[in-house]
């Protein structure tokens, strides 16, 4: 399962890289204001999508994997068919709600952007069911490839559509805000096209495997579940997933709405300026901080079937061992990622979003958000663990409490301070920390997970601190060196960042191996882990 998680994590990394790379030219086309309109609409779209379809892969993975574990192939297939009906009905209602309710959900120029998102909600449902179906069969390859295909087309169409629509707005003599709106619509078209191509790919993969699946169904003689029972089961399982995932992500929408309303109406700041400030936070600092968190999300999706199976079999020792192993893996990625983002915040922002006016603002916000990489990574995995062991209400209660605290804090900070979008960073840290702590407490009531504090937290943190310090020093040194013979600041920064990152990776790898913070077995569970172990042995960093 860890290896399968590595496959999905690798796809997640590549998808995030594609996402980061296309964000730079896209931001150059639509600007921070366009990013703000897109983010505002996308946040509402995300919540409705979470409620109608986004939780389906995890829920279907859990239900179907339980049937496959006892060889009930016919019932697994019946659940799959019922799930498709469920998402089409709920997704259709969600699409209609977003399209006709857009004027009540968002303001001004975000309304048409949100309406272009509406059809995507219906299309995403069947895609989610197919992904959950293959995850239940313990294969992450179709999901991983579909993610890459989705992101490639998303990037291509987003940039292309935004460019042509902005040119169209310019030809009409539109003002800057209208141009930004057209650009945001182009970006939303990219999101929809990516989902469509991913759905086509997943259906193609399912069609290839259909004969094999049917043979298993034909030879299955278990008693058939009634469709009424299946729909009741889907609703019972999906509802807690929806509640926990929706509340877990509702904070983003809540923060966006409160920030827009309070800053515009209480602080009397022009709406386009408020949207721009939110765009810097959400589409620059948050986008980069989310990059390493995607690995945790991939791992969480992958471990769900195994944890559900082991726990259902009352194999608690194996369940606890898997949880401990996943925690180790997540920390070895999240901690150095957080330190690296903190140490090289401004250079990374300049590399990906070279709009000079907001480099330092976005860089400071990213430094603030760096710690959330650790908190969100751990809470994402612990959320999946709690659902896998049947404690589906715990994440809902934990997320609700964290949401109440962070919402109250945000209102106070926005009304009584001049922190602006820094208040968004503070409440994001608060929310992610509370989720991390509360989920861990909930797990400890059920499982006795043995955590080696030294190897799980202290050693990775210590090695990462050294890594971050050296990386910053290397960046500054090579920046001074390159400035002497390269005239363009962007390329000076590019080469200095690349060298600093390479040095950071080497230092972290050597430090983790030499301090025995990571074993050969754990390294092999990573993507290309066997190759990495072979390389470390070849250069005598790891003993043969």
Image (cartoon, helix red, strand yellow):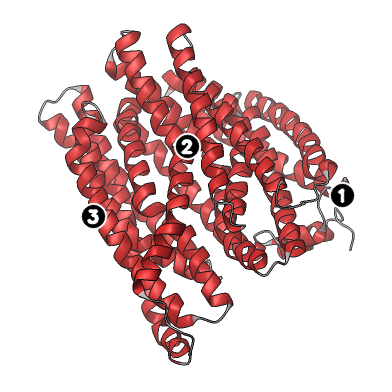
Q: Mark 3 falls on what kind of element?
A: helix
Quick one: 125 or 398, which is closer to the camera? 398
| Front position among marks 3 and 1 | 3
Residue lying at 58% horizontally and 48% vertically, measured from the top left: 383
Whether the residues at callouts 2 and 3 have beta carbons within 8 Å, the answer is: no
- Name the residue beneath numbered marker 3: 92
Residue 237 visible in rendering = yes
- Name the residue beneath numbered marker 2: 287
Whether the residues at callouts 1 and 2 have beta carbons within 8 Å, the answer is: no
Q: Mark 1 falls on what kind of element?
A: loop
Judged left or right of residue 74, residue 516 is right
Residue lying at 25% horizontally and 39% vertically, measured from the top left: 114
Mark 1 closeness class: few <14, some 14–19, many ≥20 residues within 10 Å: few
Instruction: Answer above or below: position of 303 versus 280.
Output: below
Residue 203 visible in rendering = no
Residue lying at 67% horizontally and 25% vertically, measured from the top left: 476
Quick one: 294 or 351, which is closer to the camera? 294
| Position in image of residue 120 (x %, y %) | 28, 52
| Position in image of residue 455 (x %, y %) | 82, 45
Find residue 125 and report its image quarter: bottom left
Q: Quadrant of the N terminus?
A: bottom right
C-alpha span from label 2 to label 3: 29 Å
C-alpha span from label 3 to label 1: 53 Å
Q: Which mark is residue 516?
A: 1
């Amino acid at each position: 399962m860890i290896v399968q998680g590595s496959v999905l994590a690798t796809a997640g990394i590549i998808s995030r890289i594609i996402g980061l790379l296309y964000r730079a030219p896209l931001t150059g086309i639509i600007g921070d204001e366009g990013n703000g309109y897109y983010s505002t609409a996308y946040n509402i779209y995300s919540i409705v999508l979470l409620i109608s379809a986004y939780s389906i892969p995890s829920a279907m993975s859990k239900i179907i994997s339980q049937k496959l574990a006892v060889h009930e192939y016919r019932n697994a297939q019946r659940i799959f068919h019922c799930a498709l009906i469920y998402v089409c009905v709920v997704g259709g209602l969600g699409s209609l709600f977003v399209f006709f309710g857009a004027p009540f959900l968002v303001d001004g120029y975000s309304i048409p952007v949100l309406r272009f998102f509406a059809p995507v909600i219906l299309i995403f449902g069947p895609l989610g069911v197919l992904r959950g179906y293959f995850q239940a069969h313990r294969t992450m390859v179709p999901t991983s490839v579909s993610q890459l295909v989705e992101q490639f087309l998303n990037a291509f169409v987003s940039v292309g559509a935004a460019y042509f629509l902005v040119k169209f707005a310019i030809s009409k003599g539109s003002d800057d805000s209208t141009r930004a709106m057209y650009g945001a619509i182009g970006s939303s078209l990219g999101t929809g096209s990516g989902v469509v191509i991913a759905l086509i790919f997943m259906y193609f993969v399912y069609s290839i495997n259909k004969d094999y699946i049917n043979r298993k169904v034909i030879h299955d003689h278990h008693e058939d579940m009634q469709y009424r029972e299946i729909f009741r089961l889907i609703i019972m399982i999906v509802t807690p997933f929806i509640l926990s995932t929706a509340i877990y992500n509702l904070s983003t929408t809540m923060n966006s709405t409160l920030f827009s309303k309070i800053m515009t109406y209480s602080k009397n700041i022009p709406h386009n300026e408020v949207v721009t400030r939110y765009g810097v936070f959400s589409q620059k600092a948050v986008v980069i901080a989310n990059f390493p968190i995607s690995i945790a999300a991939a791992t969480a999706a992958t471990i769900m079937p195994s944890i559900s199976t082991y726990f259902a079999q009352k194999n608690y020792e194996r369940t606890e061992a898997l949880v401990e192993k996943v925690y180790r893996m997540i920390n070895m990625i999240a901690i150095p990622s957080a330190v690296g983002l903190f140490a090289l915040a401004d250079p990374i922002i300049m590399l990906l979003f070279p709009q000079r006016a907001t480099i330092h603002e976005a860089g400071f916000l990213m430094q603030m958000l760096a710690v959330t990489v650790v908190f969100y990574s751990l809470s994402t995995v612990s959320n999946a663990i709690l659902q896998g062991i049947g404690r589906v209400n715990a994440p809902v209660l934990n997320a609700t409490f964290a949401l109440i605290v962070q919402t109250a804090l945000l209102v106070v900070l926005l009304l009584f301070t001049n922190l602006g979008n820094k208040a968004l960073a503070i409440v994001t840290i608060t929310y992610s920390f509370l989720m991390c702590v509360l989920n861990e407490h909930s797990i400890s009531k059920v499982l006795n997970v043995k955590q080696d504090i030294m190897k799980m937290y202290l050693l990775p943190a210590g090695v990462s601190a050294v890594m971050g310090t050296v990386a910053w020093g290397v960046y500054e040194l090579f920046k001074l060196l390159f400035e002497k013979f390269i005239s363009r600041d962007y390329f000076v920064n590019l080469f200095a960042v690349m060298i600093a990152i390479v040095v950071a990776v080497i230092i972290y790898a050597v430090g983790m191996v030499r301090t025995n913070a990571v074993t050969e077995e754990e390294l092999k569970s990573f993507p290309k882990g066997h190759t990495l172990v072979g390389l470390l042995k070849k250069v005598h960093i790891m003993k043969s």
